[in-house]
Image: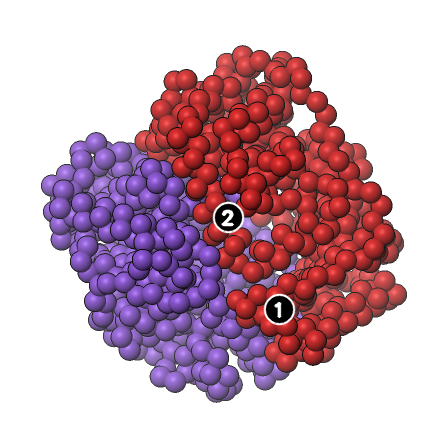
Chain colours: A red, B purple
Amino acid sequence: MSRIIALAAGLVMTAISVQAQEQVSDFQLDNGMQVVVIEDHRAPVVMHMVWYRAGSADEPAGASGVAHFLEHLLFKGTDTMEPGEFSATVAANGGRDNAFTSYDYTAYFQRVAADRLELMMQMESDRMINLRLGEAEILTERQVIIEERNQRTENSPGALMREQLSAAQYYNHRYGVPIIGWRHEMETLSLEDALAYYRTYYAPNNAALIVAGDVEPDEVLELAKTYYGVLPANPDLGPRNRTQEPPQTSARRMVFEDPRVAQPYVTRSYLAPERNPGDQKTAAALTLLAELLGGGTTSLMNERLQFEQKLAVYSGAHYRGSSLDQTTFDLTVVPAQGVTLEDAEAAMDAVLVEFVEAGVNSQHLDRIKMQLRASQIYERDSVESMANRYGHALTSGLGIEDVQAWPDVLQAVTEEDILAAARMVFDERQSVTGWLTGVSAEVTQ
Amino acid sequence: MMRFVFVAVMMLAALPARAGVEIKEVTTPGGINVWLVEEPSIPFVALEIRFRGGASLDVEGKRGATNLMVGLLEEGAGDLDSQGFAKATEALAAQFSYDASDDAISVSARFLTENRREALELLRLSLIEPTFDDVSLNRVRGQVLAGIRSSEKDPNDIASRNFDALAFGDHPYSTALEGTVQSVSGLTRQDIVDAHANALARDRLYVSAVGDITEAELGVLLDDLLGALPQTGAPLPERADLTLSGGTTVIDFDIPQSVALFGHVGMERDDDDFFAAYLLNTILGGGGFESRLMEEVRVKRGLTYGVYSYLVPKDLAALYLGSVSSANDRIAEAVEVIRSEWARTASEGVSEEELSKAKALLTGAYPLRFDGNGSIARIMVGMQMEDLGVDYIATRNDQLNAVTLEDVNRVAGELLQPEALQFVVVGKPQGL
């Protein structure tokens, strides 16, 4: 029965996926700025986003956190706007605005009634080049980002461990440095640090404009030309050549002890290839591998560790392919009460061995592919998530065509592809294993 | 890293007056009332189901039973065991989620047009014929206990638990709905079966649907889905008497940044002054970056990443709450600034300019909430639980705009009680 349903669904969804792609238009302005328009006319709302191809991994050594610091400072004044006026204006128009920073990008967005789009473009294009910062607001905002680090990281043993894990995973790449910054470097971030980053990376030829909602592509393009098209490109912008990883030849292990840990767990990351333009097949296989191993209730890790052996209360595998440089494939097992981390890790490793030896469960793979097809339908209910998907990809080295090919690349992955990806990625020499634990006694049990 | 984190505003809203979205109030042949918006452009349906009562229906000594019961609904039903149910759901690409809160059990479903009958049969099994087998019970119990143990060392959860204990005396609201290690460890299968019978019944049912389905189709499907529910469940709990006394309670916990919750009595959702209070809170601490608290505590002094206040009109009590976190050596100043803003706003009120900005924000943001089948379905089920008619849609912004400066400032004087403001601070705060 289920095979017939899946087949019927597949046919319907092929048509739908074509339709969904027709809702997306893309342009390039003369100054190099990319423009993507995603139409959804169900509600009179628009999401206006500018994504810069610059994140924490583009920071100079010694100034970790400056990308995120600058993101905060962009809400201060420009030549024509008072500090705070940007957000106040968005609010006065019934909208909300915010921004976020990651390793590969910094993005700013406003969500407003569709007829306020022009005002948003005017303000966002203004702060792309006209930022004005004073020494006093730098000092206050630096306190704010340190409190943000306190909240996100210092108060959370899990976050502190993940920071150490990443640092151990990357010998030579900036992905090993936390997005929010190392505390001792954050404390020294200066006005000049922020402005140097701003002058280098904030330019139309380093940005993608994503507009999603109740808009017409032609009208968006005209507005984009008016407000963004007139900004000068930065001719000195170089390629994003970051320091790369040398061959990794030794497995790393760490034990992170913290009395605040109530629930110990073991986690392991493996260095893994990312999605690349025109070459997404391995990343697609790794995406499906993560689903098969630890993606949901019926994943192999879940079946073995929770249902059969009853060694774990949670297990999962995670892989995020959208990344400019080498990413990671991650596994986590939270042991059941009374189960040691050593035993949990051994059981996790046994699942990996079994998977590679026994191969892929075809029915399971079919279910995952069915869900991936359906996700294209469900995602159309949220243009915001579509906008984020495009923005994330376009700032991670991918093109529009890669985004649009991705669903088909996923569907085309074979069992052999997945096994080959598993054999490739589970190389312990490229791995970091971490134990998060409350007291040292538990470690040596 | 976001510039700041939004705190969900505890307010249920209405649909915008806009062409193309029409709520149909439907009664199925079997007598189930449902609000429907037909939206055929995407071939799926978002269905929202609520049962009023939720975890507050836990009987004495069985704290956590409702939460554990809800966690077990998808862990085996009819002839399917846990894995069988999950595999069947995955094969249809249906998405079900089940959640217990203080006042309601929420069931959210998304399913594709072409297999909706099969998808809803699975959903029916989970709601009407869950097996609650011992193997699943013990597995999910282990997950819940792991969550409780983690929560006991999470500063935000510690603050909430201590605040609720101070606020709600011996009412169910006074303890965490997950229960304690002791109470959850003692729950039996019969306790879970009882919790199911107490909570899932027709007399407390609210339903909404948005998507690719007609009124007639929905009627048949809903009768099949929910028709077998018992007519009545357990009586709802009594209202809670607030037992807050003001002052600052410090919970010693070794973390670098103190986490604070604060609050006192709030405003009922059906109070005539609710909109005035809502506007007041937007100005004081609810309006994101434009609020007085954010301006004074973060923007001017850099004392925190975020400070917020929010009205919390629960079914059985109304609170006015806020939260802030600051390094241990700065939290005392943050608390002082908040108390001072609370007092200043109570005595001086707000300005005409602040009020008009707050109105612009709230009325302008109003249509932005209705941006998807799922969000519209959630809003509609919330409207029903708040006893708001569909006509509220057309009048909501007018009601907000009709609030005068005198209204807001009168409410500020009545609602804001700086001396009654209770702080719970978790950390190693200096000077508190």
The one nearer the camera, B20 or A43, is A43
Question: Which chain is disc 2 placed on?
Answer: A
On whether disc 1 and disc 2 are found on a single subunit, the reply is: yes
Q: Please tell me whether residue B68 is drawn above or below residue A128 in the rendered image.
A: below
Which one is in front, A13 or A208? A208
Taking B162 as reference, is A317 left or right? right
User: In the rendering, at what x and y percent does residue B425 appear?
Assistant: 35, 61
Measured as percent of width and height from the top left, residue B316 is found at 27, 67
Q: How far apart are marks 1 and 2 (CA)?
A: 22 Å
Disc assigned to residue A149: 2
Name the quadrant containing residue A323: top right
From the viewer's perspective, tell me whether residue A259 is left or right of residue A409: left
The residue located at (61%, 15%) in the rendering is A233
Seen in the image, is A339 located left or right of residue A424? left
Residue drawn at point x = 51 percent, y = 73 percent: B149
Closest to the observer: A46 or A130? A130
Pointers 1 and 2 in contact (C-beta within 8 Å): no
Asked if residue B259 lies left or right of residue A353, the reply is left
Decide: few, some or many residues near mark 1? Use Cα within 10 Å; few <14, some 14-19, many ≥20. many
A80 or B105: nearer the eye?
A: A80
- Is any atom of residue A283 visible in this view? no
Q: Where is residue A310 in the image (x, y as percent from the top left)?
A: 68, 78
Which residue, given by chain and number where applicable, does mark 1 sit on? A437
Secondary element type, mark 2? helix
Q: Residue at x 50, y 48 (%)?
A: A149
Which quarter of the picture shows residue A225? top right
Q: Is residue B312 above or below residue B316?
A: above
* Amino acid carrying mark 1 in the image: Thr
Q: Which comes sooner in the sequence, label 1 or label 2?
A: 2
Amino acid tagged 2: Arg
